[in-house]
Image: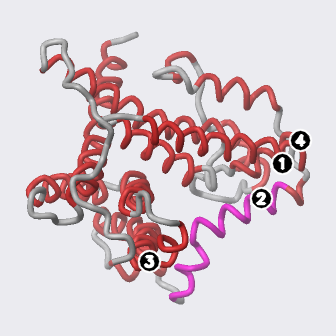
Amino acid sequence: MERADIYDAVGGLISIVWRWVSGLGLLASVYFDRPWGRGARIYQAIFALMVALNAIAGDRTVPVILAMAFAIVLLWEWPITKAALHWKAWAIGLATLAIIFFMKPFYLAYKRDLPFGRMLTGGSDPMAMVASWEAFGTHENIEGLIKSSTTYPWWNTVRDTLAQLLIQPSAFGFDSTGFNTVLQTQIFSQALYGLAGTFWGQAWAIGGIPVVIVFGLIYGGALVALHHASLKSKGMWFFFWIILGSVIGVYAHRNALENVLAQARQPFVGFVTIQVLVWVLLFGRFHTSVPAVPIVDRDYGK
């Protein structure tokens, strides 16, 4: 490995830690002392500023994942009927949609020094904003796969998925964009931008309905396993499992299987790096971890 590659790897690690330490810190501070609680205002302001700076720099991943994680931790232990109808759940949902709709146009407008309204609508009818929403684009990908009878080798999926268990798959010649490349070259070759893959479309291309069912079992099983892990975890591991579950829950709807794991690897690398740094700063010791029980009492429905 050349010196330039080492510098790039170190820079990437620093970027990952910077992005996810802010997200984990904000999530933990909100969980233990509610939003803008008296005992955590300074911490929440600092972490929120870090998340905002990352968002302005073009990172939508952490804000969207945090929104999903907030929905879980703020409504933790609530009965499902109360949680689904509570204003907090709806507010978080609206905030998530706002991030998805407005963050990228805001970033592009800032970067290109153009009016925000022009970037939002593309200079045309305001409905262009809705028509260009990623959810519709992902659905179009699935329709294109079905109409074109596109197939994708199952071995490519297995190989690239297992490769994502490496810290840096690209160093061994693997990547997570194989299925995306098929979409880009065989179905939507006219697109001048990168296309997101689709978890369900990939399953269909591998083997139709039976593989879609298998992928559904994998998806649901992963979320159930992470839920159980969060229930049994202690300390910061609780927030890590929540973040990881949010990543899988969100990105399964717009990324191929190997790309979902590539996205999940980032918070994992960031979290492990933070844990190692804490271990070093404490001279090889950890404080005794305790179950992540919030300091404030839950107000069930208030």
Q: How many residues crowd mark 4 within 10 Å: few (<14), some (14–19), many (20+)?
A: some
Residue 219: image location, x then y, percent: 67, 45
Q: Which residues are magenta?
A: 126-145
Q: Please tell me which of labels 1 and 2 falls first in the chain.
A: 2
Residue with the mark numbered 1: 204
| Observer-nearest of 75 and 119 | 75
Q: CA distance from mark 3 to mark 4?
A: 41 Å
Give the residue drawn at x 58%, y 19%. 173
Circles 2 and 4: CB atoms closer than 8 Å: no
In the rendered image, the vertical position of residue 16 relative to residue 106, given as above or below: above
Q: CA distance from mark 1 to mark 4?
A: 5 Å
In the rendered image, the vertical position of residue 122 relative to residue 224, given as above or below: below
Q: Please tell me which of labels 3 and 2 falls first in the chain.
A: 3
Residue with the mark numbered 4: 207
Q: Amino acid at mark 1?
A: Trp
Q: CA distance from mark 3 to mark 2?
A: 33 Å
Q: Which SS does the magenta portion mostly show?
A: helix
Residue with the mark numbered 2: 142
Mark 2, secondary structure of its residue = helix
Residue 86: image location, x then y, percent: 44, 77
Give the residue drawn at x 8%, y 56%. 42
Circles 1 and 4: CB atoms closer than 8 Å: yes
Residue with the mark numbered 3: 86
